[in-house]
């Protein structure tokens, strides 16, 4: 017989192996709890331990204990290594139930935040990753080496189907590549799903012919999982190339199911991160946006919103670092195209590209539709701001050279960093 106690989950001399899933946490131990004791409890609760000492027949036990292998009190962090065999292959819900499950409510810590994960090949190999990822810029669109441009009709909800399609037509004609539903527009009476999709994609085909650039639509299929599959099939039948899923509110098992069907349908998946801040907004507790993005990549989304590097209305930590991870090598998985969105307008595009580069999608809603001369002019202004940035020309200089739409946008909203 062997005993399993909290001390068995702490080994500061342990070096994680290539097959370990290595997680970094920020913690605040509870009053009266040492850092070492708190770390051992995190490792225990998230693997195969419990609050009481156990006596187990070694012949009947597979050792799946996690190991708290680093305690950095000055940095406020601990590192826990998990053996890959602890995890069911290809099951993201089971993995998260381990590394971000009961430990989030443990009394041994006043707070705990999952900061980062180092994913081993054995775990990664159970997931498909993106079908297209960054290749959508050329395989499904005609963006080339510039950022992909997208817009959401505003107001977010309440527009009739006709108004929605009219705005889409203006935006596509003005130079954006993609129309996108907002996170809370699905199948409501004022703008029914099938009618909206059919009419929008019909106009997309017309504008593709008119402009010579591929136009498409990020259709929000968010719903119960079976219904999402049905909606994805409808999008494919109408000639669409993309669907959108609110990945956090739908749940990762649903995302995995949609990913499987979208490969059969040849559809790329746009991941909206609505509700992410419920997990990542507090610096001391929850799950970081970095980890959410990692999970999304493994589950197979092609694009995901990652923030605006402080230039928009929404905030999260380290957008450049998250984007770099999404486009890094990971055992052959395709890259993910990061999406910058939330409060963007033509006057900040040069600063955004300076911060994040050109391998991104830029989505502007109010920053297009709020243009004094309307949506088409707003789309042209956004496209002109990208052209200026790609040519390394100051926005004001480019605007003064016959680009009146950009000039009007700069007059209304100003610019972030004049060159």
Image (spheres, helix red, strand yellow):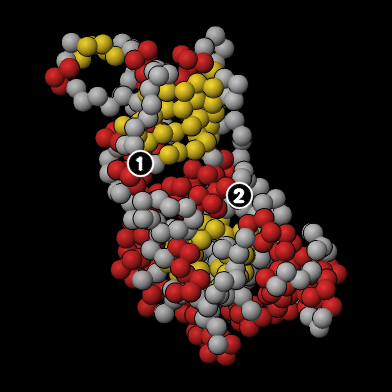
Label 2 CA crowd tier, 10 Å (few <14, some 14–19, many 20+)? many
Residue at image point 20% right, 15% down: 56
Nearer to me, 408 or 164: 408
Nearer to me, 285 or 67: 67
- Residue 10 vs 335, above or below: the answer is above
Residue at image point 26% right, 11% down: 3
Quadrant of the image containing the N terminus = top left
Label 1, secondary structure: give it: loop
Question: Which circle, 2 or 1, is nearer the viewer?
Answer: 1
Tell me where residue 391 appears, x and y as whole percent. Answer: 70, 73
- Residue 47 vs 212, above or below: the answer is above
Label 2, secondary structure: give it: helix
Tell me where residue 129 appears, x and y as whole percent. Answer: 38, 56
- Residue 133 vs 306, above or below: the answer is below
How many numbered circles are shown?
2
| Residue 227 shows up from this direction | no
| Residue where numbered disc 2 is placed | 319
| Residue 19 shows up from this direction | yes
Residue at image point 54% right, 52% down: 324
Tell me where residue 198 appears, x and y as whole percent. Answer: 47, 79
Q: In screen coordinates, is 330 left or right of 90?
A: right
- Taking the view exactly as shown, the residue that stands out farthest to the bottom is 210
Which tag, 2 or 1, sits closer to the chain's start? 1
| Residue where numbered disc 1 is placed | 120
Q: In which quarter of the image is residue 160?
A: bottom right
C-alpha distance separating marks 2 and 1: 23 Å
Q: In screen coordinates, is 304 left or right of 67?
A: right
């Amino acid at each position: 017989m062997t005993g399993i106690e909290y001390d068995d989950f702490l080994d500061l001399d342990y070096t994680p192996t290539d097959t370990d899933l290595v997680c970094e946490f920020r913690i605040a131990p509870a009053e009266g709890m040492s850092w070492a004791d708190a770390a051992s409890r995190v490792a225990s609760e998230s693997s195969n331990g419990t609050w009481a000492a156990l006596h187990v027949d070694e012949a009947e036990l597979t050792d799946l204990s996690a190991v708290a292998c680093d305690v950095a009190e000055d940095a406020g962090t601990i590192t826990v290594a998990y053996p890959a065999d602890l995890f069911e292959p290809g099951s993201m819900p089971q993995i998260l139930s381990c590394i971000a499950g009961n430990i989030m409510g443990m009394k041994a810590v006043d707070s705990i935040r999952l900061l980062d994960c180092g994913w081993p090949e054995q775990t990664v190999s159970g997931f498909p990753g993106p079908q297209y990822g960054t290749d959508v810029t050329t395989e499904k669109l005609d963006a080339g080496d510039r950022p992909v441009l997208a817009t959401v009709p505003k107001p977010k909800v309440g527009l009739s189907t006709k108004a929605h399609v009219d705005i889409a037509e203006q935006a596509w004609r003005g130079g954006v590549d993609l129309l996108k539903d907002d996170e809370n527009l699905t199948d409501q009476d004022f703008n029914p799903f099938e009618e909206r999709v059919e009419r929008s994609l019909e106009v997309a085909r017309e504008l593709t012919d008119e402009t010579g650039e591929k136009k498409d639509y990020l259709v929000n299929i968010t719903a119960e999982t079976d219904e999402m599959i049905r909606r994805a099939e409808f999008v494919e039948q109408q000639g669409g190339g993309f669907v959108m899923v609110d990945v956090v509110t739908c749940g990762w098992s649903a995302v995995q199911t949609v990913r499987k069907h979208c490969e059969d349908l040849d559809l790329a998946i746009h991941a909206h991160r609505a509700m992410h801040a419920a997990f990542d907004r507090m610096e001391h507790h929850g799950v970081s946006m970095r980890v959410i993005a990692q999970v999304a990549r493994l589950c197979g989304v092609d694009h995901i919103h990652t923030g605006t590097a402080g230039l928009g209305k929404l905030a999260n930590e380290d957008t450049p670092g998250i984007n770099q991870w999404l486009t890094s090598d990971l055992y052959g998985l395709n890259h993910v195209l990061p999406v910058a969105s939330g409060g963007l307008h033509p006057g900040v595009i040069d600063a955004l590209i300076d911060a994040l580069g050109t391998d991104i999608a830029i989505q502007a809603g109010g920053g297009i539709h709020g243009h004094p001369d309307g949506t088409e002019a707003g789309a042209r202004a956004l496209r002109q701001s990208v052209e200026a940035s790609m040519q390394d020309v100051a926005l004001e200089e480019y605007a003064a050279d016959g680009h009146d739409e950009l000039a009007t946008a700069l007059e209304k909203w100003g610019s972030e960093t004049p060159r």
